[in-house]
Each structure stands twice: as C-alpha cells, then as structure tokens.
Amino acid sequence: MPENSFTTTGCLTVPGLFQDPLLEEPPTMSAAADVRRRHADLERAAEQLCLACPLLQPCLYRAVVQHDVAGYVAGTTQRQRSLLRTQLGVLVEPEDFDALAGVGRTHRQIDHDEVVRLRRTNPDETLEQLAHRLGCSLSTVKRHLRHERRAPGGRAAVRRLAPTQSQVTEASAQLAGRRRVPDDVAA
C-alpha cells in the first residue's frame, strides 16, 4: 500500500449502520419477529464490513482490553466482548471523564484506587501529569503507587498482564466458532 494512502473503514463509510439503535441495544427475544430479523440483517452487514477491515485486529484489541464501548465494534457485540474479557481475565474500568479531562477538586481526599486506575489507563504519562489530573502533589501519587506495589498478597500480587493482540484475536475466533452454525448444518 502506498505510504500516503488512507484506508477507509466500514464504520467510517457507513456510520449509520454502526450507529443504528438496534445495534446499540439489541432487541429482546420477546420483540416482534420483523424487529429481530432487521437486527440480524444489520448485524450481518456490520460483520461483513468489520471482517473485511484491515484494522480489525487492533480495533478488536482496543474494544476488548482498553475501552468498554457500546454497540457493534470489531465484528463483536457488547455481550461478546464481555465474554471475551471474562475468558481472558480482563477488567476494563469505566471511564472517569472528570479525571480524564483533568478536572480536579481542591482539598479532597485522594482515592487510592483512583490513583492506581489512572496509572494503569495512562501508563505513558509522567507521575507529574497524573498528579495534575488528580489535583494532588507528586509525592501523593508516588505514595499511593508505592503502597500498591508493596501490598502483600494484594491486587498488585495477583494482577495479570494484559493479553496480547494475538490472544484476543484467538479468543474471538474461538467465540465466533461457537456462535456460528456451519453452512452444512444450517441447510
């Protein structure tokens, strides 16, 4: 592919498909048959676009390991991504938009779990940047992180490494194999 070429993904080409309310919130089993059929058609169309996308694997990895997004993403539903996280032992914390925006309150108690979560979700930021986000001193951030590292038998001792992109892809392929009926069986 030429260096300056741009690949347009299905989600950018047909955003209305991926933003359809039926893909955001699938119908229940008690929904009308035509609604369930429309949902299935939308899901098939989205899946075809995702499976043809050159960015499928990194998109899937981010949707499973880094961000808890809604709707149909990377060839998976929200429920399927939840199953993948369970299988891979991944916990994706909900985003704290105030902390991400750097909004801090003065003279507030700094929550230990908030410091640790921000460090995990922003590993490339300096400790000074984390302190600024939290509205506290650098020494406070260091103290909380030191406490987390030294906790005997605590979360730090049992924390697993994030799965690799290939592990997420393999788990997704296994899940896809379980949820799809082979053509020769469906006939």
Image (cartoon, rainbow, N blue to C red):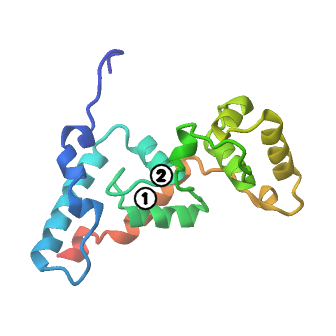
Question: On the rendered image, what quadrant is the N terminus found in?
Answer: top left
Label 1 amino acid?
A: Ala
The residue that appears at 22% across and 63% down in the rendered structure is 22
Image: 70 above or below 86: above
Residue at position x 75%, y 53% from top?
A: 112
Q: Is residue 112 left or right of residue 42?
A: right
Residue 78 coordinates in the image, percent (x, y): 39, 62
In the picture of the structure, the residue carrying the numbered disc 1 is 173
**Label placed on residue 183:** none
Q: Is residue 17 above or below residue 32?
A: above
Q: Are marks 2 and 1 in contact (CB under 8 Å)?
A: yes
Q: Is residue 186 above or below residue 38?
A: below
Q: Residue at x 38, y 44 (%)?
A: 56
Specify few, some or many for label 2: CA neighbours under 10 Å numbering under 14, 14-19, or 20 or more: some
8 to the left or right of 94: left
Q: Regarding mark 1 in the picture, which secondary structure is present there?
A: helix
